[in-house]
Amino acid sequence: MKILSLTARISLLFAVAASLVLLTTGYFLTQVVETHFEEGDRDELNGKRALIQNLFKHTFTQAELDSLPQQLNDALVGHHGLAVAVMDAAGNIWFATSGAVFPRTLLQDCQTQPIACTSGALRQWKQAGVSYRGMAVSMTTGSGKRYTVAVALDIEHHDLFMNKFRSVLALAIALAALATASLGWVATRWGLSPLRQVTDMVAGMSAEHLAERLPTTDLPVELKPLATAFNAMLARLDDSFRRLSAFSSDIAHELRTPISNLMTQTQVALSSARSNDEYKEVLYSSLEDYERMAQMVGDMLYLAQADNGLLKPGLEEVNLANETQNLFDYFEAWAGERGVSLAQTGSATVPGDRLMLRRALSNLISNAIQHTPPGQTVYVSLARHGGQATVSVENPGTDIPAEHLPRLFDRFYRVDPSRQRKGDGAGLGLSIVKSIVDAHGGSITVMSADQTTRFQLTLPALEK
């Protein structure tokens, strides 16, 4: 099924709306014209009825009654299309003009119910292909004799006029609807020209031109929110594209080093015969590079799972104090090499996945150790506040500029894009921490001031 264009839809709506308005107007106009004709006929018929009634009222003798038909003929001279019929009390047609065609029931009903005929209600009928409108009334002569008088008008010319009027009106409505649709199409095309301009500009954009923005100053009010939203989307895409490009560069750099090491070690090992111990040493050295690449790939897969809502933490009871102490034992040797001390205070227990929470704490603690100057201490504070548990990982060191803090958890983001990483992974650790915290229904914040940086996790606490 072909979908109509927006221009065609609006033009069609214009035509339909105009047709409905014109049809409604035409209907009421037709009713007004018909009512006008009916009222005109009623006035003329009432005038003739009053004339005839006056003649009957002044008839007293038989001689005057005998001369009444002639008086009626004289009174009706020049009234083309007017017909009169008079029925006496016995049901016989006492007088009738030439060409008078009345339904028999019109006279008989009035004769049997003379009181009902005093109002002179209009009746309309068609006889021998001719339309009539008339009335029947009961009259009495001056001497008291009762007669039924029917007066009618030939309204064939009215019907012809109304038929032609309806035909002309229908043609006018059709032409008006067509003209409205055409004008609506022209007006819509002109009105939507700014939208087409925006479409042309959007169609010309590509990954190489994400920095361009749609102009908003000369756009209609209705399109400004669309342009603003599209520009915001372009800004997000441009930022994501830049970070993705930087990430690709980082991944290439990180993978190039271990792959180069593996190739060099393999080439050296194959260049001459080696003892078993020498081959083992080469394999152990290679294993370190394999583990580094495996960790990098695992981190990317982990974030891909988080993006698709596949991280489903368990609901076991996790003692964060114990997990922190175990991590201190794990990092003790490395921290000692760097001259960094580790300290813990407080306690907290939360429901969740122990391995996932341990990984989040591990990333934060290793990050803190890495950025702590020698001779300083990394502090981990645990606490419970109502139904929430908080974990604060604090380390001294150079302050992180405030403009970078909101984006530290964005994957691929670097505080210093020009700095090359050496041995600290692809920079996905904090993104993984945020994914784990989000999966547990918690939140994470960071602050850096006065030579101190603190990451704080807030998690739902275990109900007591």
Image (tube, helix red, strand yellow):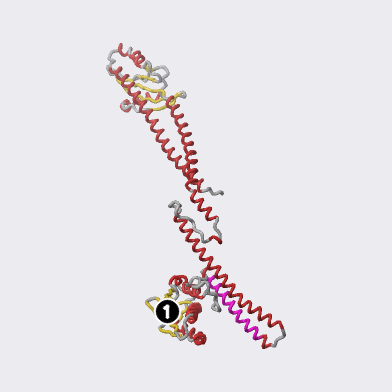
272 w.r.t. 158: above or below? below
Region in magenta: 280-305
Q: Is residue 294 magenta?
A: yes
Observer able to see residue 27: yes
- Identify the residue at the far front of this view: 418
304 w.r.t. 221: above or below? below
Secondary structure of residue under mark 1: loop
Q: Where the C terminus falls, by quadrant?
A: bottom left
Query: Circle 1: is it few (<14), some (14-19), or many (20+) Cα within 10 Å?
Result: few
Question: Toward the viewer: 38 or 314?
Answer: 314
Observer able to see residue 442: no
78 w.r.t. 192: above or below? above
Location of residue 143 in the rendering, given as x and y in whole percent from the top left corner: 27, 16
Question: Toward the viewer: 297 or 254?
Answer: 254
Which residue is at 47% across, 77% downward? Answer: 352
Which residue is at 44% across, 40% downward? Answer: 20
Location of residue 302 in the rendering, given as x and y in whole percent from the top left corner: 54, 73
Location of residue 8 in the rendering, given as x and y in whole percent from the top left corner: 51, 45
Q: Is residue 49 magenta?
A: no
The kind of residue tagged 1 is Gln
Question: Toward the viewer: 271 or 100?
Answer: 271
Judging by the rendered image, the residue that carries numbered circle 1 is 451
Residue 114 quadrant: top left
Location of residue 68 in the rendering, given as x and y in whole percent from the top left corner: 33, 14
- Identify the residue at the far right of this view: 273
- Identify the residue at the far top of this view: 63
